[in-house]
Image (cartoon, helix red, strand yellow):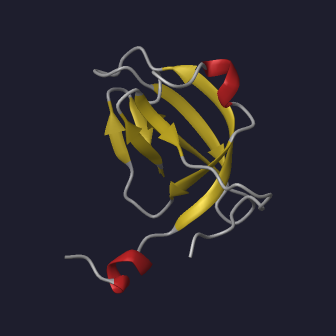
């Protein structure tokens, strides 16, 4: 069972998607997204399997939460630097977003 110390190891931050592209080389349908986490962390890229619920043109400008302290992970020919968080539903993954205005780089706690 996980405990609070395990949770506190995760660095989960607010970011804004600034660019998105199809990820044709991925085995499962996915997008490449670039997320701006603010001055301290900067822009990081991620592979996101969110094609069932989102179109490319609606992602740019979206505020999301992401784990920024996992090791980089190579997916096909792309290096994923962060894990963008979402909820698995029967219809696809829904991204997690704050319901109030927050700043890029703000930390989940």
Q: Is residue 73 left or right of residue 98?
A: left
Residue, far top: 24
Q: From this viewpoint, is residue 49 visible?
A: no
Quadrant in the rendering for residue 38: bottom right
Q: Position of residue 63 (x, y in %)?
A: 69, 46
**Residue at position x 64%, y 61% in the image:** 41
Q: Position of residue 107 (x, y in %)?
A: 62, 70
**Residue at position x 57%, y 33% in the image:** 33
Q: Position of residue 26 (x, y in %)?
A: 34, 22
Q: Nearer the viewer, residue 53 or 103?
A: 53
Quadrant in the rendering for residue 104: bottom right
Q: Position of residue 20 (x, y in %)?
A: 61, 27
From this view, report whether residue 61 is shown above or below residue 67: above
From this view, report whether residue 78 is shown above or below residue 44: above
- Quarter of the C terminus within the rendering: bottom right
How many numbered marks have been drawn onto this rendered protein structure?
Answer: 0
């Amino acid at each position: 069972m996980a405990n609070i110390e395990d949770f506190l190891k995760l660095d989960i931050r607010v970011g804004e998607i600034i660019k998105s592209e199809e990820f044709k080389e991925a085995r499962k349908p996915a997008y490449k997204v670039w997320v701006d986490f603010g001055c301290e962390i900067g822009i990081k890229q991620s592979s996101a399997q969110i094609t069932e619920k989102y179109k490319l043109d609606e992602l740019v400008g979206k505020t999301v939460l992401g784990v920024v302290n996992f090791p980089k992970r190579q997916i096909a020919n792309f290096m994923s630097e962060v894990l963008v968080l979402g909820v698995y539903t029967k219809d696809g993954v829904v991204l997690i977003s704050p319901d109030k205005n927050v700043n890029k780089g703000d930390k989940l706690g």
